Image: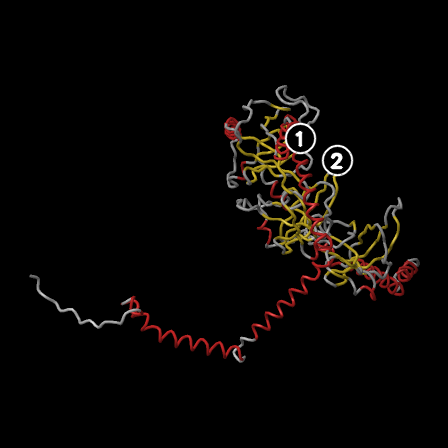
Amino acid sequence: MPDSPRAERRTQRSLSPIWIVPLVAVLIGVWMIYDNLSKLGPSITLIMDNAEGIEAGKTLIKTRNVEVGRVERVSLSDDLAHAEITARMSPQAEAMLNSDTRFWVVKPRIGREGISGLGTVLSGAYIQLLPGGGDQPQRTFTVLEQPPVASPDAPGLRITLVSQVGNAITTGDPVTYQGYTVGRVEDSRFDPKKREMRHQLYIQSPYEVLVTSTTRFWTTAGVDVRLDSQGFRVNVASLESLIGGGVTFGVPDNAAMGRPAKPGASYVLFPDEDSAYEGSYDQYLEYVLLVDDTVRGLSPGAPVEYRGVRIGTVVSVPWNFTAPQPDSLSRFAIPVLIRIEPQRFDEEQQEIDTDQWYQRLERMFHNGLRASLKAGNLLTGALFVDLNFHKDVVPFQRMTFVERPVFPTTSGSFAQIEQKVSNLLDKLNNLDVEPLLDTLNDTLATTRQTMEKVNGIAASVDALLADPATGQLPANANATLRQLRDTLQGFAPDSQGYDELTQTLSRLEKLMRELQPVVRTLNDQPNALIFDKKLTEDPQPRAPR
């Protein structure tokens, strides 16, 4: 019994109220820590090649100009290959962080579209966040070097262009249709295995309907100057393309619009518009020309024409030059590979019966269809292949060269001119020129004698002109003319001679009037000057007896 009060006092000391205050403080601290932690957003890691302009505790992360995070730490990676940036995001930004989210640094930039990011000159650079629409959360991102053209979930169409190395197309270049910008190049990468460039294009809505299965893409240079067999041409693109180039597209003339393009579709990027439209003729007939003439000036891409209408294209010059040639032809002929493109006659025809076309051309070969090289531009010497019917040609014989049918050929215009000149020289060499030379010598001798006589006459004329009397002839002639002028002046209307002459003519006229009766009398009676004139009565009419 006596121990129970002590036990009660010990129990009362262990439950002393003084311990309540620290306990409440601990609980409040735990609650504050929990509250702070619950309000903190996720931590993300950004990978950059260069952390220029990024400062820990100062650089902000924004989207639509609203702060959604801040950079906490800037460090190098373990392998020193890049910079790693640790940033704390706000809770509201957690839903934005997924596989499609994009980050890039906003700073002053000078590009084809102008100057951007001038506001960061005073405030400093910041990191821009473009929310993505992906389903997979992500906490590590690679910061883009350039701002993206559009968000991954932006309405529109994304396609891929494949081109050979050398096309100057970079990220951000414009994609135009008939001069109007309808999209941008999002990415350009080189595939070393396939040795080709792959460009990703974004066509913004609603212009994606312009891209179909028959659409052709080509690069646009600032100024395109050409001097070929077709003549001299200059094409000038837009000012933006003039500075940095770009991509344009279209559908070949008279071609069907085709089916709408699917996302991710792949197209070939051609170097120019002509090549793009030529690439639409994907069904063709291949022939080999075995040319005996020179092929200088004939280049791949040159036209194959029939009476001025293009029906094909030269593919390769020369082609398999070392391959054995048919025994019936010259073994030193230059092989040229060409394509006959029937789609040029009917572009709406989807399928071409190549066997039928081979048979049709073979019938034309038997009728004299031949190929020859002609000059398309005298200034550059560019040649093209001309197809036409000829008479008096070697009969056609079917033959092949490296498993390709041989298109029969004939000499070109220059070769024909050369042959004619050669024939003319042969005829001149065969002429008997000795009689002609003898006749020419006689003619020259006669001409020499004639010239000697002409020289004698010229000497006589010179002597006559040198005579002093000849020199006085002009003075005598002038004196005679003066006397004649004085004489003529004496008969002027106001002169005395003129009045005397007038009076003389008047008297003569009067005399002539007075002589008229005498003349009539003499006409009636010629002897009136000797005998007197007898008066006779007028005859009286009488009746016959």
How far, Cα to Cα, is label 2 from label 1? 78 Å
User: Is the C terminus in the top left, top right, bottom left or bottom right quadrant?
Assistant: bottom left
* 2 or 1: tag closer to the N-terminus: 2
Q: Which of 482 and 48 is in front in this view?
A: 482
Within the image, what quadrant is residue 511 found in? bottom left
Q: How crowded is mark 2: few (under 14 residues within 10 Å), some or many (20 or more)?
A: few
Question: Which residue is denoted by mark 1 in the rendering?
Answer: 437
Residue drawn at (74%, 63%) of the image: 65
Residue 52 rendering spot, x and y as whole percentages:
86, 56
Note whether 238 is above or below 394 in the view shown.
below
Which residue occupies the foreground of this view, 20 or 454?
454
Which residue extends farthest top?
327
Up-down: is 184 above or below 503? above
Q: Name the residue under label 2.
A: 193
Q: Can the viewer see residue 95 in this picture?
A: no
Residue 454 drawn above or below residue 55: above
- Give the number of callouts: 2
Most extreme residue toward the front, as rendered?
530
> Within 10 angstroms of label 1, few (less than 14), some, or many (20 or more) residues?
few
User: Looking at the picture, which amino acid does disc 2 mark?
Assistant: Lys
Residue 370 coordinates in the image, percent (x, y): 56, 30
Answer left or right for 80 relative to 519: right
